[in-house]
Amino acid sequence: MSGRVAILTPDPEDEGYQSRWRDLFERAAAPLRAAGLEVEGPSWAAPGDLTRFDLVMPLLVWGYHRAGPVWQDAVSRWEAEGVHLLNPTSVLRWNADKLYLGTLAERGAPVVPTIYVDRCTDQMLNEAAELFDSRTLIAKPQVSASAWQTIRWSPGSSLAGAPEDAAMIQPYLPAIESEGEISLIYLGGQFSHAISKRPQPGDFRVQPEYDGIIAAYDPSPDEQAAADAILAQVDEDLLYARVDLVRDLDATPVLMELELVEPDLYLRYDEEAPARFAGAVGRSVRRNAAPVRR
């Protein structure tokens, strides 16, 4: 296999540049190089001419949510230049704003109940608590990542650290602590592997940045069915996807997040996952290189 692939990385001026992205870059790049592909990691903020690559993946554009207009302008520019982006630009725009959860819910996908507000206030949170019949809520920005400006709130709690702009509010589901958040990873449209993520005692955040407890996981039939049903509502073909589920108060798997822009694919938690990733990327490169039949 031959071809040139770019995995876009953070803006060096953003705080995400000091994070663990380099390790994940190497975990993704190694199986691609082993398959014969050339791999580079240009910063999404100043990547140069991306048309020189056979495939560009925004897998490590961490911090894009703190530069919303700049990110959207970059995506539009790459689209106009004909850059072979996967996931595609339409998905990158749609999935960057968590309003997509409402769209999926309207299409019948199992989604955590969510309301959207222009600003997170005590009044809004109290009204949401009554609406959801829940004394504990989660509030996060509509455009966010890695629990940025995300709080767990109960009546009388402080709003310190709450979203500063447009926000989404959901009931807090205790299963996140007892059973964890379940992430099912899909590569090339096919289920690859899954992990569970549980927070440290007393916390609610499961991300590695908060020392979440991560382990390989064998999804149950209802979790697999829920993830399949959610992805069936996405019209575009996806190179990669991560479906984050949690069980609601009725023990039904529901969607927390559908990660289609820059998800950690947790490749090291399944022996075959790196090869599956390389295979999916290789197929996309070959399809892009194939001559158009007339």
Image (spheres, grey):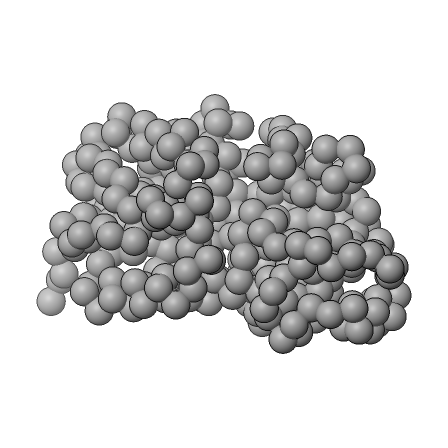
Relative to 123, is 239 on the left or the right? Answer: left
Q: Which of 39 and 284 lies nearest the eye of the viewer? A: 39
Identify which residue is drawn at 32% across, 67% down. 73
Identify which residue is drawn at 87% across, 61% down. 155
Q: Where is residue 63 in the image (x, y as percent from the top left)?
A: 44, 51
The answer to whether residue 96 is visible is yes
Residue 89 found in image quarter = bottom left
The answer to whether residue 217 is visible is no
270, above or below 256, in the image: above
Q: Which of 182 and 222 lies nearest the eye of the viewer? A: 182
102, above or below 246, in the image: below
Q: Which of 121 and 83 lies nearest the eye of the viewer? A: 121
Relative to 280, is 255 on the left or the right? Answer: right
Q: Where is residue 3 in the image (x, y as percent from the top left)?
A: 17, 40
- The quadrant of the image that shows the N terminus is top left
Relative to 242, is 5 on the left or the right? Answer: left
Identify which residue is drawn at 78% across, 57% down. 158
